[in-house]
Amino acid sequence: MNYSQKRTLIGRIVYIGLTLMAVTILVVTMYTFFGSSKRGEKDPPAPDTVTEAAPDRPSSTRPPQTDRPASVDTEEPTITPPDDEWKPTDVPPKKDWTKLKVLMPVQGNVYKHHDLTNAVYSVTMNDYRVHQGIDIECTEGDDVLSCAYGTVTAAGYDPFMGYTVVIDHGDGLISRYRNLSDRFADGIEEGATVYAGQVLGVVGDSAIIEISDEPHLHFELELDGEPLDPMTMIDYNEEEAVSASASDDK
């Protein structure tokens, strides 16, 4: 084979090689183009992409995927307490004082009763007048007790009824202890809290308008701003009180 023939053969080989490379590149390019087009049709739209189905295309009947867990609401549920559950803002039920009893503030015979209709004779004033409380006969110096738990709202001198202690028992009940001596018990002052049976002071003779009466405690009760007969709320046995008073006289 001469030089011319060799050159021709080499040229043909190079041409065939270039042709094969061009064909290969073309095939790869076409495969890549058509392959990406098919994948684009199969891939679902991005989460933030909104697609509208063609009007004449039926909606998909494809069942929902079950391999993805349902969304979980992480917000804590609101718990509503039952209506009968106690809450800090609840207010205790109001006492019905008309169904309750209080202590006798001093032991003795009730010789002058509560009366707002029929006037009661006053030895000191020498006239008849209504009586808002009860007068309990006793001995001067006897202890005077709080009839129930409460708060002292006044402890001082009244120009007509003498030394007086006033207690607010809550829920509308007020008690007044009059004709005391000027010696109140320790701690008995405005704002003090007292318990049932606590000593407030002792019986005296400081009530000017009742100064002629026997030594006694003038005791009043008031409910919701209206005078109340203390005899409706205290345990009082008249026979025992009279017997005890007679024994004291001996």
Image (cartoon, helix red, strand yellow):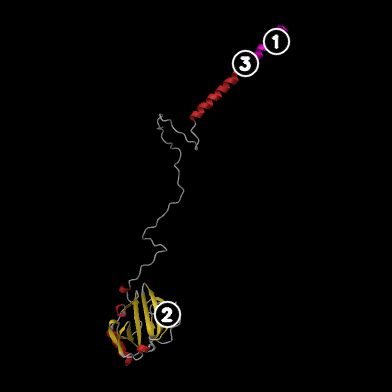
Region in magenta = 1-17
Of the residues shown, which amino acid type is indicated by label 3?
Thr
Q: Position of residue 151 (x, y in %)?
A: 41, 76
Q: Position of residue 96 (x, y in %)?
A: 32, 71
Q: Is residue 239 above or below residue 38?
A: below
Say whether disc 2 or disc 1 marks the residue closer to the N-terminus: 1
Check the picture and name the quadrant holding the N terminus. Answer: top right
- Please tell me how crowded label 2 is: few (under 14), some (14-19), or many (20+) other residues with Cα within 10 Å: some
Q: Is residue 239 left or right of residue 140?
A: left
Say whether disc 3 or disc 1 marks the residue closer to the N-terminus: 1
Residue underneath mark 2: 154
Residue positioned most to the right: 3
Which residue lies at the image location 52% right of the left edge and 26% below the top edge?
37
Kindly report the distance in space between the C-alpha atoms of the residues bearing marks 3 and 1: 18 Å
- Examine the image and state in which quarter residue 52 appears: top left
Residue underneath mark 1: 7
Q: Is residue 7 magenta?
A: yes
Q: Position of residue 168 (x, y in %)?
A: 39, 76
Of the residues shown, which amino acid type is indicated by label 1?
Arg
Q: Is residue 44 left or right of residue 218?
A: right
In the rendering, which numbered label is found on residue 19?
3
Which residue lies at the image location 42% right of the left edge and 78% below the top edge?
152
Q: Nearer the viewer, mark 2 or mark 1?
A: 2
Check the picture and name the quadrant holding the C terminus. Answer: bottom left
